[in-house]
Amino acid sequence: MAGGGEYSVAAAGGGGKVACAAWIRRREEKTTRVFAVYGRPSPPALEVLGFDSVRCSLSEEPLARIVLGDDSDEAPRGIAVHPTGDELVCATANGCRLFKLIFEELTVRFIESKAPALESIGPQKCLAFSTDGAKFAIGGEDGHLRILHWPSMKVLLDEPKAHKSFRDMDISLDSEFLVSTSTDGTARIWKIDEGAPLVNLTRSSDEKIECCRFSRDGMKPFLFCTVAKGTKVVTVVWNISDWARIGYKRLLGKPVSTLSVSMDGKFLALGSHDGDFCVVDVKEMEISHWSKKLHLGSPVYGIEFCPTERVVISTSPQWGAEVTILNVPADWKEWQVWLILLALFLTSAILFYVFYQNSGSFFGAPHQTTKPWSVLNEAPPSPENQNPW
């Protein structure tokens, strides 16, 4: 079930639950087309579904489907789509497999490509392309971090003991930094071009840094992390210029299983271990949308924002994938902005004409004085307790 006034649509496509999902954005000459890719564990398969931006729904049947094998070790565990939409990497228990996507007018085709640097490297927990598509990073269950130049596959960083085991990972908007978190609660910042660790994020001995995402609006270079102390969780903001904490807020109010950020950087999404998720307005750091009991009793493994609409795909091991239309203010369309500007121009022209026609009586009116606003003298409020716990 869905809460908060949103509209939720069950997973489309073939049979079987969805283990992981991602959006595909195709920028073409005169338009942008959006698709979704689903990874199904039984039988192991990948599917591409069309997205209808008018109805905000996915196609009933997949446009393309490829079976990865009969062995359960070939089941998809994670998907990373290249920003161009032409390639995707699928993580399995054995390693990663690379696929090219060939889009035609009404069909899509999968073509598997050889990628020795990604094959036979074992199970991977985190996969991420940089925003410009020039770098690809993978973090394994064994704590091994690899950062590759794309598409040459040149190794930029290879650190077998980056962590005990990876928990989460993200690449900054400018592709300069990578943040990674471990299952033991530690977090590290890596300088990608130098191929070396830069700094460990500070924490107290009883804190665990869990999920991490860089800001995406390009104006406020921040890092968001969820920090747990027992059962209490806050979202902490770090300044990436000196990696110092600059603020925190308790948002979801329960242990967090996943964190995501919209492509325009305006919204954060936090998923819980019991099936809820909320969406936060980054500017105000206030919750704008709640989906309660959407994945009832099952942890939300992933939340993916649609690149063009206020829609997300959320996945959980018990309930698979759900497509949810967010109950947040709609963005201004380009034609709406131009319409407002035209209305303001016409209003200004009309007011100028009226003032001009009545300029004699208007400027000849007696001058009236008014008393200034009274000033309320109050003691400033005492600052809040800065201890998040």
Image (cartoon, rainbow, N blue to C red):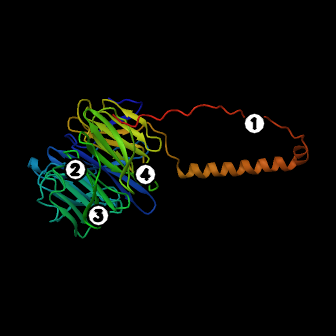
Q: State the mark number for residue 264.
A: 4
Circles 1, 3 touching at the beta carbon (< 8 Å): no
Badge 2 is on which residue?
Answer: 78
Q: Residues within 10 Å of mark 3 (few under 14, many from 20)?
A: many
Dividing the picture into quarters, in which one does residue 159 lie?
Answer: bottom left
Mark 4 crowd level (few <14, some 14–19, many ≥20, 10 Å Cα): few
Relative height, residue 133 to residue 322 (above, below): below
Contact between marks 2 and 1 (CB within 8 A): the answer is no
Please identify the residue farthest to the front as the structure is shown.
379
Q: CA distance from mark 2 to mark 4?
A: 23 Å
Callout 2: SS: strand
Q: Earlier in the sequence, mark 2 or mark 1?
A: 2
What amino acid type should be assigned to the residue bearing mark 2? Gly
Disc 1 from disc 4: Cα separation: 43 Å
Q: Residues within 10 Å of mark 1 (few under 14, many from 20)?
A: few
Q: Are marks 4 and 3 in contact (CB under 8 Å)?
A: no
Give residue 192's mark.
3
Q: Earlier in the sequence, mark 4 or mark 3?
A: 3
> Which mark is drawn over residue 372?
1
Q: Secondary structure at mark 4?
A: loop
Where residue 257 sits: x, y (%)? 26, 39
Q: Amino acid at mark 1?
A: Pro
Q: Nearer the viewer, mark 1 or mark 3?
A: 1
